[in-house]
């Protein structure tokens, strides 16, 4: 069945209202005495785009995991950056994380739930990651995972699930995810927009669409908590639970029933976008960050913006940013990556120019060539490896900086992860909040290359055309840079 784009108002405006204050009260009551620690595995750094006051660890050692368990907060993140890995690498990483988490939980006698946070446009190593977590957790504990919750809703990014169909918002339209550029991803592509059918497609028919348990917006908005809880209690055999949602309140209503089901002895895996983490972690909304909250002292140096993402939205945002005459722009010709000597010389040129401009107090944008490298059919893994080489080159700009920038903005998931972990050498960061909706800011730890620097993690597929420009204007302390 062909699914066409729809007017957003047509799909969203007819939904019945719900008493949000009552929902908050019910959820808060349900949370009381719920002891399980929520551990969010983030396949790129953008999963913290809805939270604040939460720790992000960039390794999964026993020591880091135990530190996360001992924190007062009910949730912590582990950045895996697995979307930049090949399948065998992410399988090994998830096996190791699940084993270490199980060991720490047993040592501290602390129950836990792992959430696999991935892309709200359905890209990533699915079902490999959650299946690996399931097998490893069950092998190292007496837990049996009864089902898997699929909840890619992300309001700030315009990702909505309605009648089990996942949509991406483009202006006034909602477009089925399977008909967007994201579904054409050469590594993580798909064709289905109905989430039950998407699961069937991604699992090669192992889990059939008709067998999925669907939590409808009708039952959610009717606050039919008993019925939703009963649906969850009936799930077995690691079958899938598709959650429809168009607002955070829908996730909160589902979370009430979910906690009730977990209290009744059910265990679940989760494949989610960022909104679920905020709700289940009990993280309150806060105002967007101001420049004064992020930059406490002026360094006299320029800011550094690094643009690696190739999605159309990023290119549009870069074009808007180029309208700022006070910013210097340097293109890195990433297509030279197939010629190691030429690529090395290109990287040296970019680093030297960036260093000199920052020292002069100029803000610099380094961006990769906009055309995606295409090696042809059947060479996806080779392309993925070359993309890693390109990301390492961008990361080396930060690694080799001797001048501390006033701030750093990284555009794109792989880019921002590598810059955070390898360029800035962050082991643990605190999420300060969001500078724009869906755009998180880390404050780097004392161990990092530049301690306490505001590091803006700007997802490739979030924001409007002017959002990157507006973010930089805010950081520069100028309403307009024209």
Image (tube, grey):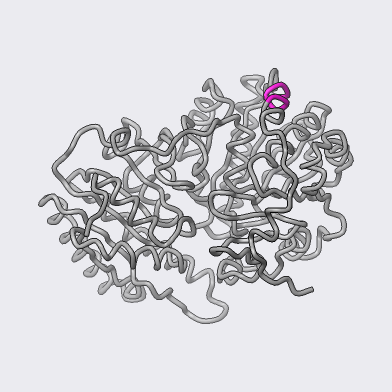
The one nearer the camera, 84 or 181, is 181
Is residue 28 inside the magenta stretch? yes
Q: Please give the name of the residue rendered at 37% of the width and 64% of the height, measured from the top-left corner.
A: 390
Using the image, determine if residue 223 lies above or below residue 2: above
Using the image, determine if residue 310 lies above or below residue 259: below
| Residue farthest to the top, as pictured | 33
Q: Please give the name of the residue rendered at 22% of the width and 43% of the height, measured from the top-left corner.
A: 406
Residue 171 screen position, x and y as percent: 54, 63
Q: Residue 471: in sight, yes or no?
A: yes
Quadrant position of the C terminus in the picture: bottom left
The one nearer the camera, 90 or 153, is 153
Q: Please give the name of the residue rendered at 86% of the width and 43% of the height, measured from the top-left corner.
A: 235
Is residue 221 inside the magenta stretch? no
Residue 470 screen position, x and y as percent: 34, 53
Left or right: residue 424 compared with residue 380: left
When asked about the image quadrant of residue 264, the answer is: top right
Using the image, determine if residue 160 lies above or below residue 263: below
The one nearer the camera, 360 or 124, is 360
Quadrant position of the N terminus in the picture: bottom right
| Residue farthest to the bottom, as pictured | 376
When asked about the image quadrant of residue 284, the answer is: top right
Q: Residue 428: in sight, yes or no?
A: no
Residue 89 screen position, x and y as percent: 55, 54
Main SS category, magenta section: helix
Q: How many numbered discs sit on the rendered protein?
A: 0
Left or right: residue 31 compared with residue 421: right
Q: Give the range drawn in magenta.
A: 25-30
Residue 167 screen position, x and y as percent: 65, 61
């Amino acid at each position: 069945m062909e699914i066409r784009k729809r007017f957003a108002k047509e799909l969203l405006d007819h939904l019945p209202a719900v008493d949000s204050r009552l929902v908050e009260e019910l959820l808060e009551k349900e949370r009381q005495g719920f002891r399980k620690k929520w551990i969010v595995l983030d396949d790129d750094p953008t999963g913290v785009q809805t939270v604040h006051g939460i720790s992000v660890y960039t390794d999964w050692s026993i020591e880091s995991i135990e530190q996360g368990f001992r924190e007062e907060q009910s949730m912590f993140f582990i950045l895996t950056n697995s979307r930049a890995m090949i399948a065998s690498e992410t399988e090994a990483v998830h096996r190791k994380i699940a084993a270490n988490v199980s060991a720490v939980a047993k040592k501290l006698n602390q129950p836990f739930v792992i959430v696999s946070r991935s892309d709200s446009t359905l890209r990533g190593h699915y079902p490999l990651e959650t299946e690996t977590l399931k097998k490893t957790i069950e092998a190292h504990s007496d837990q049996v995972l009864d089902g898997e919750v699929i909840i890619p809703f992300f309001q700030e990014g315009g990702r909505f699930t309605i009648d089990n169909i996942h949509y991406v918002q483009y202006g006034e339209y909602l477009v089925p995810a399977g008909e967007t550029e994201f579904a054409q991803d050469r590594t993580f592509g798909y064709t289905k927009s109905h989430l039950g059918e998407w699961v069937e497609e991604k699992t090669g028919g192992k889990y059939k669409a008709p067998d999925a348990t669907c939590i409808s917006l009708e039952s959610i908005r009717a606050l039919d908590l008993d019925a939703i809880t009963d649906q969850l209690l009936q799930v077995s055999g690691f079958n899938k639970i598709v959650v429809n949602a168009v607002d955070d309140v829908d996730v909160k209503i589902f979370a009430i029933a979910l906690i009730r089901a977990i209290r009744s002895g059910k265990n679940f895996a989760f494949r989610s976008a960022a909104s679920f983490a905020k709700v289940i972690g009990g993280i309150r909304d806060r105002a967007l960050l101001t420049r004064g909250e992020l930059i406490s002292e002026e360094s006299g140096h320029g800011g550094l913006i690094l643009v690696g993402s190739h999605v159309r939205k990023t290119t549009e945002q870069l074009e808007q940013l180029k309208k700022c005459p006070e910013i210097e722009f340097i293109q890195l010709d990433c297509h030279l990556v197939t010629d190691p000597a030429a690529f090395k010389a290109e990287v040296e040129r970019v680093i030297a120019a960036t260093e000199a401009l920052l020292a002069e107090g100029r803000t610099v944008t380094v961006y990769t060539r906009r055309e995606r490298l295409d090696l042809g059919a059947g060479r996806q893994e080779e392309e993925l490896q070359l993309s890693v080489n390109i990301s390492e080159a961008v990361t080396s700009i930060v690694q080799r900086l001797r001048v501390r920038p006033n701030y750093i903005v990284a555009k794109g998931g792989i880019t921002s992860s590598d810059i955070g972990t390898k360029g800035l050498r962050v082991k643990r960061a605190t999420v300060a909040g969001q500078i724009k909706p869906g755009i998180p800011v880390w404050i780097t730890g004392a161990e990092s290359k530049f301690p306490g620097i505001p590091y803006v993690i700007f997802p490739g597929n979030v924001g409007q055309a002017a959002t990157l420009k507006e973010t930089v204007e805010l950081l520069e302390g100028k309403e307009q840079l024209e």
